């Protein structure tokens, strides 16, 4: 693997599961140093509305189980990501796993299209998006598919994160503040963003907590953040 390429990967992998989780999971992830999460806030209501599902609410349970297993495999390799992110051997192993999962996901996209809430439930759709979030070769394709779907078929939070990933990879400013890049100093730096003044409003609309809360949660997970790279209003 090319070492500089690993240093500039446009993701905070350890945060992905928390971002796709329900508010209760976010509560479990927060550290005592972080202000309490307001689970009655607009962002939490959006998040909860997406993640609530019924047992009879999808059409392809076998595909759902495949996707959930893929997500478990993805996340098992990301345990303690924050303390291992600068280990180049771990980085190679992680990218090899991502490549394998991307191949499987590409086959699913070819056969079924993009898994949606109607097809595999909210958890299954989230699992599919989680694999995509960690694999650049799939991201532009999936974002185009996501944009063609009616509202309510994909997590708005997952789509927003994917949009940020694609924009940053293309050299454009992110919109939701989800993306950091690892620099030569082995710290994560906030990627350029547009219209920062309204970022928290955009985040709330798709089910993401406020930026200051997000940054606090990320710091508690372990990745070294360059907080000076954050806009002043988002710094701890």
Image (cartoon, rainbow, N blue to C red):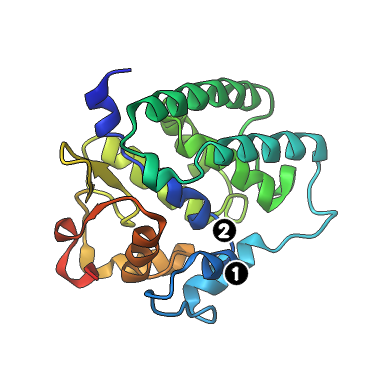
Q: Position of residue 77 (x, y in %)?
A: 53, 36
On the question of residue 163 being in view, the answer is no
Q: State the mark number for residue 24.
A: 1
Q: Which mark is residue 200?
A: none
Circle 1 — which element?
A: helix
Q: Nearer the viewer, residue 76 or 8?
A: 76
Q: Which residue is mark 2?
A: 21
Discs 2, 1 touching: Cβ within 8 Å? yes
Residue that appears at 64% across and 40% down: 72
Q: Is residue 27 above or below residue 83?
A: below
Residue 209 x %, y %: 42, 68
9 displayed left or right of 95: left
Q: Position of residue 164 (x, y in %)?
A: 34, 47
Q: Quadrant of residue 28?
A: bottom right
Badge 2 crowding class, 10 Å Cα cut-off, few under 14, some 14 to 19, many 20 or more, is: some
What secondary structure is marked by label 2? loop
Above or below, 55 relative to 84: below
In this orientation, does residue 23 appear?
yes
Residue projecting furthest to the right? 56
Q: Residue 144 versus residue 133: which sits nearer the camera?
A: 133
Name which residue lies at 34% across and 57% down.
176
Residue 86 vs 204, above or below: the answer is above
Query: Dividing the picture into quarters, in which one does residue 106 lie?
Result: top right
């Amino acid at each position: 693997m090319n070492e500089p390429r690993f240093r500039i990967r446009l993701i905070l992998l350890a945060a992905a599961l928390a971002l796709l989780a329900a508010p209760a999971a976010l509560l479990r992830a927060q550290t005592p140093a972080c202000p309490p999460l307001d689970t009655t806030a607009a962002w939490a209501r959006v998040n909860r509305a997406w993640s609530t599902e019924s047992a009879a609410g999808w059409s392809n349970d076998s595909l759902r189980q495949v996707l959930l297993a893929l997500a478990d495999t993805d996340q098992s390799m990301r345990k303690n990501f924050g303390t291992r992110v600068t280990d180049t051997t771990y980085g190679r192993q992680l990218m090899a796993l991502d490549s394998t999962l991307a191949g499987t996901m590409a086959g699913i996209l070819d056969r079924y299209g993009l898994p949606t809430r109607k097809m595999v439930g909210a958890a299954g759709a989230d699992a599919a998006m989680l694999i995509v979030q960690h694999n650049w070769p799939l991201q532009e394709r999936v974002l185009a598919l996501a944009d063609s779907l009616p509202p309510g078929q994909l997590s708005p939070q997952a789509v927003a994160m994917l949009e940020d990933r694609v924009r940053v990879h293309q050299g454009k400013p992110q919109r939701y503040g989800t993306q950091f890049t690892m620099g030569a100093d082995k710290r994560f730096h906030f990627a350029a963003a547009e219209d920062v003044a309204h970022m928290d409003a955009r985040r709330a609309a798709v089910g993401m907590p406020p930026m200051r809360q997000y940054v606090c949660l990320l710091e508690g997970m372990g990745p070294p953040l360059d907080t000076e790279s954050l806009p002043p209003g988002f710094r701890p």
